[in-house]
Amino acid sequence: NVTQTVEGLERYPVNIRYYRDYRNDLDGLRRVLIPTPTGAHIPISQVADISIKKGPPGIKSENARRTAWIYVDLKGIDVGTYVEKARQIVADKIDVPTGYSLVWSGQYEYMQAAAERLRLAIPLTILIIFIIIYMNTKSIIKTGIIFIALPLSLVGCFWYLYFLG
């Protein structure tokens, strides 16, 4: 550890990681020359204890909160269905302690944002189509008949496509 950083009541060690070429050769890393305040160059092993230790590659944070990520590759199931099932299982089996939170992110987050936009866009589009048809027919009754016929036409289209294979 080079030093420590203090965050609230917690202390975190600060480590330095050198280039991969040097990290793979511990003796080579110990011979790396560093400048001193007088301008001379000395091996880093004279001022530091160098060792290889396993640990996390870094402290990830988002919105000023430390985070841990779990990556999942899905096969044979869509993201929405997976998240709903996983959310239920996690809620049943894990009690999230105070100060911790669980967020479903990634593709699911994008899917939720798209669904939210569609909740506004689809009704607005239907309203615009209704207004255009009304402006063309100048009759609420005729416009209503067209809108009532549309779902029935769609059912007929799907039946026709089904029978054609």
Image (spheres, helix red, strand yellow):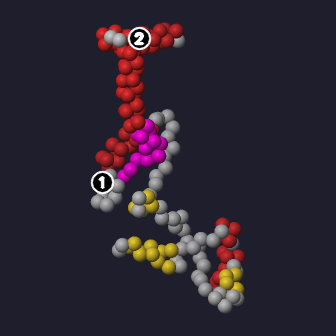
Q: Which of 161 and 165 is in front in this view?
A: 161
Which numbered marker is on residue 54?
A: none
Q: Which residue lies furthest to the bottom in this view?
A: 38
Mark 2 highlights which residue? 153
Q: Is mark 1 on a helix, strand or loop?
A: loop
Say which residue appears at 35% left-offset and 55% top-offset: 101
Say which residue appears at 41% left-offset and 40% top-offset: 112
| x and y, in percent, of residue 74 in the image | 50, 40
Q: Is residue 105 above or below residue 54?
A: above
How packed is label 2: few (under 14 Cα within 10 Å), some, or many (20 or more)?
few
- Residue 101 seen by the camera: yes
Q: Nearer the viewer, residue 22 or 138?
A: 138
Q: Does 88 sit left or right of 34 as displayed?
A: left
Principal secondary structure, stretch drawn in magenta: helix
Query: Tag 1 or tag 2, which sits nearer the N-term?
Result: 1
Mark 1 highlights which residue? 95
State the separation of the CA atoms marked 2 and 1. Answer: 50 Å
Amino acid type shown at disc 2: Ser
Q: In this view, does 68 lie above or below 118?
A: below
Q: Is residue 63 above or below residue 105?
A: below
Q: Nearer the viewer, mark 2 or mark 1?
A: 2
Which segment is the magenta one? 102-115
Q: Which of 92 and 140 is in front in this view?
A: 140
